[in-house]
Image: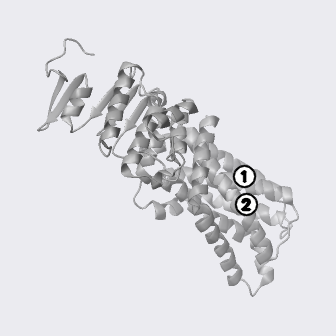
Amino acid sequence: MLRDAALVAGKDLRIELRSKVATNQVLPFAVLTLIIFAFALDADRGLLSTVAAGLFWVTVLFSGLLAIQRSFALEAGDDARDALRLSGLDGAAVFLGKAAAVTVQLLALEVLLAVGAVVLYDVSLSGAALLIATCLLATAGIAAAGVVYGAVAAGLRVRETLLPLLLLPVLAPVLLAAARASEAALATTTAAGWPWVRLLAVFSAVYLAFGVVAFGPLLEEA
Amino acid sequence: MLGADLRRDRRAVRRRVGLLGHATFLYDDLTVAENLAFAAKAARRAPSEAQTAMERLGLAGRLRDLSVSKLSAGQRRRVALAAVLARQPELWLLDEPHAGLDAAGRDLLDGLIREAVHDHGATVLVASHELERASALAHRRVTVAGGRVNGGVHAASGKEPAHAP
């Protein structure tokens, strides 16, 4: 299964590198969103640094929606989704491969956004390990839930507008936990961050387990 | 199907089937070589099968590293056929396989089908409007006309076969 997952992830990442949609569209969108938040709250620099963690994760979430939609759009051309179905690949492996590809893209995006947040929001890092653990777990959760709901929406005519409606409520706990843990890592709160990381781990594990079980049947029906 | 239960072992059966339909089932942003390598690996075949398929279909030269989006319709059709070949299927399902191919490509396809049947023992099901070409290839011919299926005649003689091939 892991071999098949690596095959799918490699294929998706190669297509993204080749098409440059992630670098030419998703990344500029994410940076623009960070800048717009900075403009909106510029009069109050103190407030901007206080809410930096939340703004960072909202930006990641919106950008993640684009990356997830893109992950299924690249299967839409020339009935490639049918090719994936008929290839004989395990549904769980396709899920893990797609989730891994989205995770890699989002993690790369988060590194660049973190630099942007330091510059624009005037924040400093005080808990590197906490922030890294938060990013890894939250991104895995976003990618796992996103790929499952992406498969649900993929076969529908209204998929572009339906996916955010389906996905954002499901990802609200991830957003909340990631923002609280990141606030602790950026020392903008005195509350402990690691309990939120444990909550993130639980949500990510649940979404991953659900995807492994449910993605195959969803791919068949999409 | 292929001696297996589709309800219980669908994935394993699919790995043994090659499908060429109206769509070519290719990824536009991958090169010819990458598309064929993906097809072969997904079917648990060695990467060398992709190379062999490229050579057989005349794709191993300058076309191999071209993105599929840059190919003509006929070239895409050849790549799709090469993807089927790279999977080394036991059952080939070909829907209008000659469409979009030039004369050389059509002859090549006919040769590949004969080779798959005679040398590898594969079963090939061809849906085609070109009755003469299909009859020249087939052991059995089934026609659909006016909503009626007239089936199972020996393709060359037009008579009922003595036994199923």
Residue type at mark 2 is Ala
Where A151 sits versus B59, above or below?
below
Whichever of labels 2 and 1 marks the residue nearer the N terminus, that label is: 1
At 66% from the left edge and 56% from the top edge, which residue is drawn?
A105
Q: Which residue is mark 1?
A: A137
Instruction: Identify the image quadrant of residue B163.
Output: top left
Residue A33 relative to residue B51: left or right: right
Residue A213 pos. (x, y %):
56, 39
Query: Circle 1: is it few (<14), some (14-19), or many (20+) Cα within 10 Å?
Result: many
Foreground residue among A3 and A128: A3
Tell me if residue A171 comes above or below residue B135 in the rendering. Answer: below
User: Residues at badges 2 and 1 in contact (C-beta under 8 Å)?
Assistant: yes
Looking at the picture, how far across and down is residue A146, in whole percent? 58, 54
Q: Amino acid at mark 1?
A: Leu
SS at circle 1: helix
Q: Work out which residue is located at the far top of the displayed protein and give it.
A: B162
| Residue, disc 2 | A178
Q: Residues within 10 Å of mark 2 (few under 14, many from 20)?
A: many
| Number of marks in the rendered image | 2
Where in the figure is residue A38, as x and y percent of width and height? 71, 80
Q: Are marks 2 and 1 on the same chain?
A: yes
Label 2: chain letter: A
